[in-house]
Image (spheres, coloured by chain):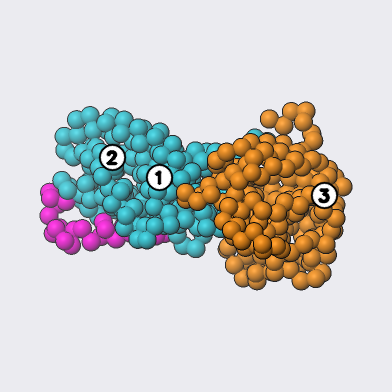
Chain colours: A orange, B cyan
Amino acid sequence: MQGQSNKSSIMMNNLACMRSNRLIYQHISIQIGAREILWVKGRNGSGKSTLLRQISSLLPILAGQLEVNGDIALTDETLTFDPNLPLEKALRFWVDLDGSSLTKLDDAMQLFDLVLLSDIPVRLLSTGQRKRANLARIFASEAKIYLLDEPYNGLDQDNITALDKAMMQHQKTGGITIIASHIKPAIAIDHILDMDQAHLHKKQNGEQL
Amino acid sequence: MSKSIYPLVEREVRNAWSGGNLWMPIIFFISIAILFPFAVGPDAKILAITGGGVLWIAALLASLLPMERLILPDRENGFLDQLIVRGYSDELIAIAKIIGHWFAFGPPLIIASLFAAALIGQGDDRMGLIILGLAIGTPALAGLGVTVSALTAGLNGASAIGGLLLVPIAIPILIFGAASLSPEPGSALQLLSAASLAVTMVSPFAAGAALRALRE
């Protein structure tokens, strides 16, 4: 399915999502190409995570079109590792499954300061360490499209800088990054998608963010 | 990107065997075999007639033991989602789970049955039949176990509901499995094969559909 389309892209046209009979959002239209970063902004519960899940084909499409070219790497609030495995082995599971390179994993572990934690079972890691481990999983992946749900949560300043650096590196190599965050990322953003505008339950029109 | 199920099966088996989970079904299985003669008395004739059935009931219940950890942990820590994002289908995930579950309890159970059989008065001449029957029937039990775990993942009292769901579907396997050990088996072994084949073939699709429903 890869074929000749080396260029990654995401196209959403009038996209809508419904969960448990509740309309989460509608009329989402945006086009993202290679080397672009999208910031999905919005309050808690505005549908940011849901949008990332829909792009990842984890949720059905209620209406509109969604076209995704390129493999996806997604990180959200889930652990995504076997709790009893040492961190490096846990990361290796995904690296091996994806067939990505071990050097990339080493680089990612170095970047997010995880090398010293290699032998610690995942269940003993702190929230911030788990977050970093998940980011390392993403940046070790060869996928062209990175979907990051609240990537800044639980990171200290050094790691925020590391994350920004990694995202710019991914941009340079032609990748797409979508950041769902209630905080404005410090790096240059190509597109902004405001989920509060797409939110059906937004009644008070006077209220502005 | 080819979707290999080998790493998934390997992971299932590793998770099942780590932390002593490997021994649970076996100890359970042998405990029943030890307790049974105490309950019905040591009469060799009665044991010979009823022992085969007990062996199969024990096998069925042993396959139910790990049901809570087959699907729910993977759903909660995002493993299932990650596989879907990578292009795995729900059915393929289900197949990997079934094969992994079978490896984790099938062969150990068959080995344990060698010891258990003697305890419940099954003579040496029945050993071949017992092993053959369990080898044929356990894949169906694995398929049912994964399907029922997927159906009940996240429900309150999942294992109780799971047991209730599984038992009626497992009855044909139980009937033909136990009958193959009776004095006049007829074509019980063939019917066991047919029932087991049907259940094993359908279960990836049923479990796959249940996994898909879990995502909403």
Horizontal and vertical percent position of residue B62: 34, 54
Q: Residue at image x 63%, y 36%? A: A65
Using residue B12 as the reference point, say whether residue B30 is left or right of it: left
Question: Start and end of the magenta stretch?
Answer: B22-47
Using residue B95 as the reference point, say whether residue A54 is left or right of it: right
- Please tell me the numbered disc located at residue B147: 1
Q: Residue at image x 23%, y 33%? A: B188
Which label lies toward us, 2 or 1? 1
Q: Earlier in the sequence, mark 2 or mark 1?
A: 1
Residue type at mark 1 is Thr
The quadrant the N terminus of chain B occupies is top right
Mark 3: few, some, or many residues within 10 Å (few <14, many ≥20)?
A: few
Residue type at mark 2 is Ile
Question: Most prominent secondary structure in the magenta stretch?
Answer: helix
Observer-nearest residue: A10 or B170?
Answer: A10
Output the chain of dot 2: B
Q: Are marks 2 and 1 in contact (CB under 8 Å)?
A: no
Q: For residue A75, what is the image quadrant?
A: bottom right
Question: Where is mark 2, residue-wise?
Answer: B173
* Labels 3 and 1 within one chain: no
Question: Where is mark 3, residue-wise?
Answer: A190
